[in-house]
Image (cartoon, grey):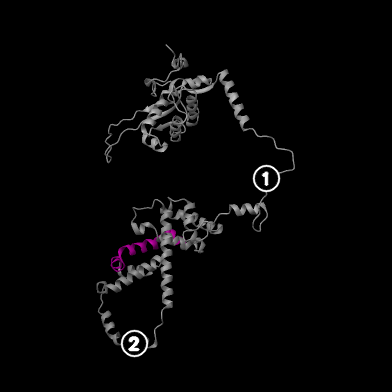
Amino acid sequence: MHPPNDPSRDRRRDGITLVPGDEQDVLTTRSRRCQPRRWLKAVAWLVDSGMHPKAMATTTVSVALDLAERMDFQRGIVLYDLEGTARRLGISRATVKRHIKVLRELGALVWLQHGSRRNLRIPGRPYTATATVYGATIPPAYDHALGHRLSGHGYTATHTGFTPAGRAQAIAAAQAASAGARREPPSRTNTTHSPKAELRGNSTTTRSARADKIAKPKKKSLLGRAVTAAAYQSAHRLARTLRPLHNWLQRSRIEQLSWVLVDKATDGTPLEEVHAWLHEINPVHHYGPNWRPAQAHVYVAAKVLQDAEHARQQAELIAEQARATPPTAEFHEAVQATRSIHSTGATEEFAQITGIDDLDASLLQQMRADAWSRFKYSGDTDLVLTAVEILSPTEAARLYTRPLVDACIRFNSNPRLQSAY
């Protein structure tokens, strides 16, 4: 009876025996696990040694290379992927199976998980089978031939050193590799083999040439502006000062808020205006107290772009009005005549209005839009708060809507906002 790691068990009179099927599993193998790089070296040695009569230096090694490219680098674990290996190597499925069997019989592969064609019945998939998983291993014959000392046995054994014969082999191999890479000493002549430097442009200094080579374009802001160091520092001061004053901004870092506020800093917007703007776009006013953005800086960036689009549309409207043809004198005379005719009737009509219900729908809509615009773009709450004071909060809500009245009251009573002015 031979001990588990006795290499003589792998030998016969006419050569080295192959690993039997009952020892090709991770639980019964006498081979040790290894990483892909050392495994490929061991596979090449096993194929070149002629241990297996069906091993080929082309196909067997090609299959091993395909497995190594997909292996876990630390543990040497790989999925079988029969169809993919055959397609990548341009060979038949039967050929792949044959050379995988060669690697198992050489002791270079062990089963970690046996595949099965049994349907796993995964919901949403008509048929699912388990995959075969292999582990890269080095057989005892390879360790014995190269004089390796091992600690442990089986799949978990590790390489700890060399026998005297193995140390001599390792030294000889290292010297041969070093001699193959050794270069001749340089000749002591005046001839130089280095190419001449080609200078282009007006700069002749190495530092300038290197700076031109590694120059990178400046980053752009949300609105497409070049971000300078001064602008970013100003935005950083804004973010560092205002972030503690707004609870809904706490999930974003100072650096993230600084980047989305760069355009405000570039425009020279004062701290007080940015503070009021952040209070205005507070999600509580628009979505209720139960919603807070997970990425507040993304929400702020969206509002910056939205305001920029609104400003662009307003500028286009003003420019279009400036290009319009001014009214003629005859038009002004017609307007004055119309006003004089209907002035008495209009006065009588408005005199009959006794409450909010008597207001015309278009006039009521215009009043609400004007109040929303004043509050949104300039923080003006006078119209709404005056209605609250004179009419009562209920009547003011009927006139200007409840969300606008509540937003103006909160805006006016916020102590943090008031201290900023």
Percent x, y of residue 95: 38, 31
Front-lying residue, 125 or 291: 125
Q: Quadrant of residue 52?
A: top left
Mark closer to the observer (2, 1): 1
Q: Secondary structure at mark 1?
A: loop
What residue sits 67% from the left and 34% below the top? 184
* Quadrant the N terminus occupies: top left
Residue, disc 2: 334
Front-lying residue, 293 or 173: 173
Do the numbered discs 2 and 1 sit on residues whose CB atoms are within 8 Å?
Answer: no
Of helix, strand and loop, which mostly describes the magenta segment?
Answer: helix
Percent x, y of residue 233: 54, 56
Mark 1: amino acid = Ser
Question: Is residue 144 among the parts visible in the rendering?
Answer: yes
Magenta range is 393-421
Percent x, y of residue 371: 36, 69
Query: Which badge, 2 or 1, comes first in the chain's sequence?
Result: 1
Q: Quadrant of residue 349?
A: bottom left
Question: Is residue 381 among the parts visible in the rendering?
Answer: no
Residue, disc 1: 194
Percent x, y of residue 133: 38, 30
Was residue 399 drawn as part of the magenta stretch in this picture? yes
Furthest-top residue in this view: 1
Query: How many numbered markers are drawn?
Result: 2
Would you place residue 226 above or below residue 197 in this image?
A: below
Circle 1: is it few (<14), some (14-19), or many (20+) Cα within 10 Å? Answer: few
Would you place residue 257 above or below residue 37 in this image?
A: below
